[in-house]
């Protein structure tokens, strides 16, 4: 099978980091393509950035052939519903995937994202997915997305903030709320002594599973192809 993971922003260092984080977890028979649009925004922080990034992400999906499933590697699930309309193969958003994964292994889980302005977007997504009941907190590290490129410093900030929110929320699991944090889950889990969910890895593994189960995106009503006008 061939899985394409799309980093919806244009920052190639994040794209490379996502690829490196996924390689240890990918099935030997899966061909992995990790890419990003050439136009758009360097990072996604809020609805305005998300709308811009969605357009170019959708174009990339429409132009990509012989792909068995797509993963959108932004925790906001940028353009997810529209992406499911323009293709029949499974499209996974890492935010939705991470919430599902956490719900399988814990009764209470918290999300740690980058900027405060993303918190309400993530809360609304969790409610829409029906996964908000056991999500006991969505918190921001007040760290710009591009600051994650300084991975050592950013990882320490995320760790200190994670300690605080796990104690405050009495959570059993932490979800990393940004694709730029991919690859940090194992280190943080060891230091925090709780499971830490990497949405990119979860999204990739869910995508592989759906392909193996021969499941495609339903075109019955909600995700039918857009009609020509």
Image (tube, rainbow, N blue to C red):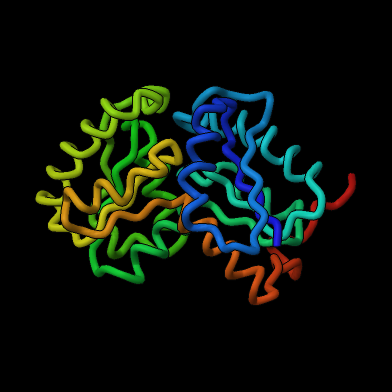
Q: Residue at x 39, y 36 (%)?
A: 118
Whole-percent x and y of residue 49?
54, 28
Whole-percent x and y of residue 92?
57, 56
The image quadrant of residue 213 is bottom right
Q: Residue at x 17, y 51 (%)?
A: 192
Whole-percent x and y of residue 166?
16, 51
Q: Residue at x 51, y 56 (%)?
A: 203
- Left/right placement of residue 13 relative to residue 111 reads right
Above or below 190: residue 208: below
Whole-percent x and y of residue 153?
26, 25
Quadrant in which the N terminus is drawn: bottom right
User: Observer-nearest residue: 2 or 218?
Assistant: 2
The image quadrant of residue 224 is bottom right
- Left/right placement of residue 27 relative to residue 163 reads right
Above or below 62: residue 104: below
Q: Residue at x 71, y 41 (%)?
A: 58
- Left/right placement of residue 70 relative to residue 112 reads right
Q: How many marks?
A: 0
Residue at the extreme right: 229
Residue at the extreme left: 167
Quadrant in which the C terminus is drawn: top right
């Amino acid at each position: 099978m061939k899985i394409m993971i799309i980093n919806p922003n244009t920052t190639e260092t994040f794209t490379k980091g996502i690829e490196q984080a996924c390689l240890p977890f990918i099935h030997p028979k899966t061909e992995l393509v990790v890419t990003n649009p050439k136009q758009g925004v360097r990072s996604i922080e809020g609805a305005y950035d998300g709308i811009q990034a969605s357009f170019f992400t959708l174009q990339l999906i429409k132009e990509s052939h012989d792909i068995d499933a797509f993963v959108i590697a932004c925790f906001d699930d940028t353009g997810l519903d529209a992406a499911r309309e323009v293709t029949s193969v499974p499209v996974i958003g890492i935010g939705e995937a991470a919430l599902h994964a956490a719900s399988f292994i814990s009764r209470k889980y918290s999300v740690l994202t980058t900027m405060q302005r993303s918190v309400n977007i993530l809360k609304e997504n969790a409610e829409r997915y029906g996964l908000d009941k056991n999500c006991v907190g969505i918190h921001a590290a007040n760290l710009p997305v591009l600051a994650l490129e300084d991975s050592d410093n950013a990882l320490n900030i995320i760790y200190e903030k994670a300690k605080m929110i796990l104690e405050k929320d009495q959570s059993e699991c932490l979800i990393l709320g940004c694709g730029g944090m991919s690859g940090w889950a194992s280190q943080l889990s060891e230091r925090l002594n709780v499971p830490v969910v990497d949405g990119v890895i979860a999204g990739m593994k869910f995508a592989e599973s759906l392909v193996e189960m021969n499941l495609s995106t339903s075109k019955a009503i909600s995700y039918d192809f857009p009609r020509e006008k």
